């Protein structure tokens, strides 16, 4: 636009100069020799105008070139600015392995900082953000935090992304997906989310379905299952062999085995419970404490005494203390000693 104005103004100026020379100075003509070449005879006014026109054209070319270079640089800044906006969006969304390349030094520093940082939005309202792309992301994040379901497909997030996991939780709570649907198509979901769903699933599911998806078994799910063994509602009737196989799916310590015995004490028959922990103690030393707990809880003192008498002096001191108090007619709940 400005180049066009400059060209028109320059042309008018050259015409005025030529007119002034021709009208007020001289109307004569002259010929010139340029490097041995005879040039045609032209009006002196025209000879004055021609260098002006050449200068104007040269300046137009000069201005056009640097204007073009300036536009290229401006485009680089605009592209880098858009990349920076995308980097902020990716940081808000919690994307991993973020790496953007920038053409300008000004944005390269800011971009590298953002690509290697975690950013958590603290805006009270997305309306405070002028950029539409960032505002929409903030709206989506806020909606997910409030328990709403948001379409995140356009952001191409991994199933392990925290926002995706929370969004799937919201979908589950709103009934858009069922527990069995999640477990059946588990490759579409993060394993941690599948484990969460499995905990809910085992509260009502039949044993064959529980066993089908036992790859998602966790300690929390295990205790949910054990609470149903021989219970009055949603009961599961499981043999000791089945329970041994189930417990073998997880790495359990002495405290876990004791907690398992305590849970089973609510509904399991004493004979089955005692036999189960006897079998466990034979397979795993970590379960001996739970076996002793079970024996004392069931008042089976003779087998408990046999284990304690054959143990080292520094072993099972809590149970030995309980036995000593019991022999002195001091009655305490065995749960206080584990």
Image: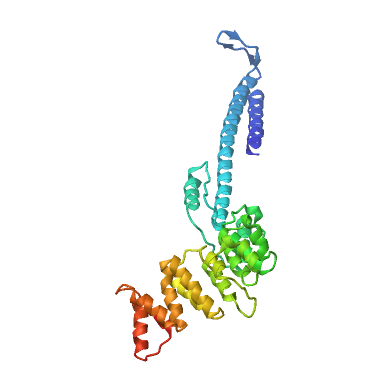
Image quadrant in which you'd find residue 336: bottom left
Relative to residue 74, is residue 122 depicted above or below?
A: below
Image quadrant in which you'd find residue 128: bottom right
Task: Give percent across and percent down for residue 201.
Answer: 63, 68
Front-lying residue, 28 or 161: 161
Horizontal arrangement in the rendering, residue 279 relative to residue 327 (left or right): right
Front-lying residue, 94 or 298: 298
Front-lying residue, 190 or 301: 301
Point 60% across, 33% down: residue:
64
Q: Name the residue furthest right.
A: 176
Horizontal arrangement in the rendering, residue 305 relative to residue 259 (left or right): left
Relative to residue 11, is residue 144 depicted above or below?
A: below
Task: Give percent across and percent down for residue 334.
Answer: 42, 83
Q: Is residue 172 visible?
A: yes
Quadrant of the image containing the C terminus: bottom left
Task: Give percent across and percent down for residue 311.
Answer: 33, 73
Point 41% across, 74% down: residue:
289
Quadrant of the image containing the N terminus: top right
How was this image coloured? rainbow
Task: Give percent across and percent down for residue 212.
Answer: 63, 61
Relative to residue 76, is residue 11 depicted above or below?
A: above
Point 52% across, 68% down: residue:
219
Horizontal arrangement in the rendering, residue 283 relative to residue 183 (left or right): left
């Amino acid at each position: 636009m400005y180049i066009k104005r400059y060209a028109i103004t320059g042309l008018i100026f050259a015409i005025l100069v030529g007119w002034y020379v021709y009208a007020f100075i001289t109307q004569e003509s002259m010929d010139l020799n340029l490097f041995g070449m005879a040039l045609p005879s032209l009006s002196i006014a025209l000879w004055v105008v021609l260098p002006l026109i050449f200068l104007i054209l040269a300046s137009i070319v000069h201005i056009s070139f640097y204007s073009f270079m300036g536009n290229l640089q401006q485009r680089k800044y605009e592209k880098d600015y858009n990349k920076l906006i995308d980097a902020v969006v990716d940081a808000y969304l919690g994307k991993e392995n973020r790496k953007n390349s920038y053409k300008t030094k000004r944005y390269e520093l800011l971009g590298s900082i953002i690509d290697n940082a975690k950013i958590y939005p603290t805006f009270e309202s997305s309306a405070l953000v002028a950029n539409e792309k960032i505002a929409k992301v903030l709206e989506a994040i806020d909606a997910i935090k409030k328990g709403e379901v948001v379409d995140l497909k356009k952001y191409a997030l991994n199933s392990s992304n925290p926002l995706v996991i929370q969004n799937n939780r919201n979908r589950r709570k709103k009934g858009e997906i069922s527990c069995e649907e999640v477990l059946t198509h588990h490759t579409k979901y993060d394993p941690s989310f599948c484990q969460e769903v499995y905990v809910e699933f085992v509260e009502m599911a039949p044993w064959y379905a529980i066993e089908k998806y036992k790859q998602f078994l966790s300690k929390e799910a295990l205790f949910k299952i054990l609470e149903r063994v021989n219970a009055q509602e949603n009961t599961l009737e499981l043999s000791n062999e089945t329970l041994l196989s189930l417990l073998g799916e997880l790495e359990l310590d002495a405290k876990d085995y004791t907690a398992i015995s305590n849970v089973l004490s609510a509904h399991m028959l004493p004979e089955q419970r005692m036999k189960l922990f006897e079998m466990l103690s034979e397979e795993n030393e970590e379960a001996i404490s739970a076996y002793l707990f079970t024996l004392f809880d069931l008042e089976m003192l003779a087998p408990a005494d046999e284990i304690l008498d054959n143990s080292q002096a520094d072993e099972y001191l809590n149970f030995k203390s309980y036995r000593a108090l019991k022999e002195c007619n001091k009655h305490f709940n065995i749960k206080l000693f584990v």
